[in-house]
Image (spheres, coloured by chain):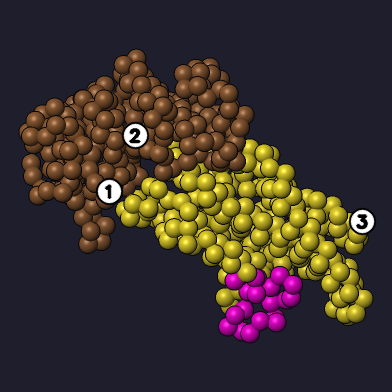
Amino acid sequence: MFIQVKNLSKKFNDTIAVNNINLNIEKNKTLGLLGPNGCGKTTTIGMLLGLIRPSEGEIIIDGKNLNEYSRDEILVRINFASPYIELPKKLTVQQNLEVYGRLYGIKNLEERIEEISEDLDIKNFFKKKTGELSSGQKNRVSLAKSLINKPEILLLDEPTASLDPDIGDFIRSYIQDYQSKNHVTILLASHNMSEVERLCDSIIMMKKGKIIDKGTCEQIIKKHGRNDLEQTFLKLARGKDEL
Amino acid sequence: MNFKKIYALGLRHLYLISNSFPRILDLIYWPTVQIFLWGFISKFFTLNSDYYSNTVGIILTAAILYDFLFRASISFNMMFLEEIWSRNFTNLFIAPIKISEIITSLTLTAILRTLIGLIPAVILAVPLFGVSVFKLGAPLLFLLIALYLFGISLGLLVTSGLLRFGPSFENIAWASLFFLAPLGCIYYPIEILPDVLQIIAKCLPLVHIFEEMRSILMTGEVNNIDIIRSISLSIIYFIFGVIIFYVSYFGAKNRGTLINMGE
């Protein structure tokens, strides 16, 4: 397994945000992280990014405990995109990509920026300030930043939230295509069930900090006797915790 | 230390400044207003006070040096706050840059912000009021180093507070220097303070810096002990600031406040 999470827990004072979860992600696969708001998805992502220290348990990436990596050694292999974090608004798209490319120590940075900008179709607003972009444009720039270092592990938190169906589809197609060409391991947190069905090889369902089900989309839908993932999500989110 | 990464983070702030003329104007505006205000007060005191009669512009020089400290500290805080305001905080902290490199980059970039603000004011003071900080001679360099280190130390303590308490700590960032100003003996000698406060004030590098400044301007005497004390104390505060920053960073990792920090 490329990523192994063993007995991972996080307590904030008396609140248990993540409760003894175990998950594995194979290299070049996409795992979907599903669950209602406040179920511990962001905390789990935060722990994988090294932004939150787990209360218990361990995270093993490529055979090595996350604690044994130095900060820059592991972070150069990971990246993250979320509509809830932004790039500096007063910098142009080009300047932002340059700054992050340099922070990630990218060689041939100009070429890399050129390549990714063409792929994500962001060149026509390259000189615009990031704060002046539409949601769809910002999302593509954020994705460009998250791919600037060709990460081995990509964490995506609702990458198509608040996007129109056209842009949403563009982003989903791009992620799918990018993964097949670049063999990146993806953890995708999303509330969009069709997105999850389309992109994820397997999923885990979280509720109140615990994993309540895991498997492929088909397995989970079948197990709960529903027609699609959305109905299954509703059943699990509203029903009793199970596994 | 990877200087390319230090430069990359500095570049982010250079772009921020160069992209916005109002931002450059804002950097220059306040120090210039300070120079005008203290320049006129200084002129008035020079004409009406025995104490200042032989030392033209002593208050103005103090104002320039205090502003240097103020700008250094605020520049450091501002660059950190910019990451919070722009919701870029998480992106920065998941980038492969060491905490020591972030501190170094902010410390070095703060010099530039400080100088952009202060150089026009320093130049203006010469023709307008006949006051030049360069009259302090070679010790000026050491006084500026001490002031800068202390300013950055205060910046580190404030940013540690931002890491610990989140954006709500922002107001403290603005108030921090005003809180220390009375004890710094910037415009008056330490003897003015009550005995108890004098003991506390001597623990701050500011007293030694401004006593030295007055000594040079009024008597022409350079007191090396004061210079050494001011730099030594500033280094101690700087080390303390770095330690507190690391403690706050690890505390923020425990509390989970590094993710999604923003306004």
Q: Where's residue A121, x and y in %?
A: 50, 21
**Residue B191 forms part of the magenta stretch:** yes
Mark 1 or mark 3: which is in front?
1
- For the point 29% across and 30% down, the residue is A195
Chain letter for mark 1 = A
Earlier along the polypeptide chain: callout 2 or callout 1? 1
* Nearest to the observer: residue A125 or residue A156: A125
Q: Which residue is mark 3?
A: B127
* Same chain, labels 2 and 3: no
Residue A51 falls in image quadrant: top left
Chain given the colour brown: A
Label 2 to label 3: alpha-carbon separation = 59 Å
Q: SS at mark 3?
A: helix
Find chain B in the image and tell me its colour: yellow
Q: Where's residue B54, x and y in %?
A: 90, 72
Q: How busy is the neighbourhood of tag 2: few (under 14 within 10 Å), some, or many (20 plus)?
A: many
- For the point 23% across and 52% down, the residue is A17
Label 1 to label 3: alpha-carbon separation = 63 Å
Q: SS at mark 2?
A: strand
Q: Is residue B14 something one can see in this rendering?
A: no
Label 2 to label 1: alpha-carbon separation = 16 Å
Q: Which residue is mark 2?
A: A156
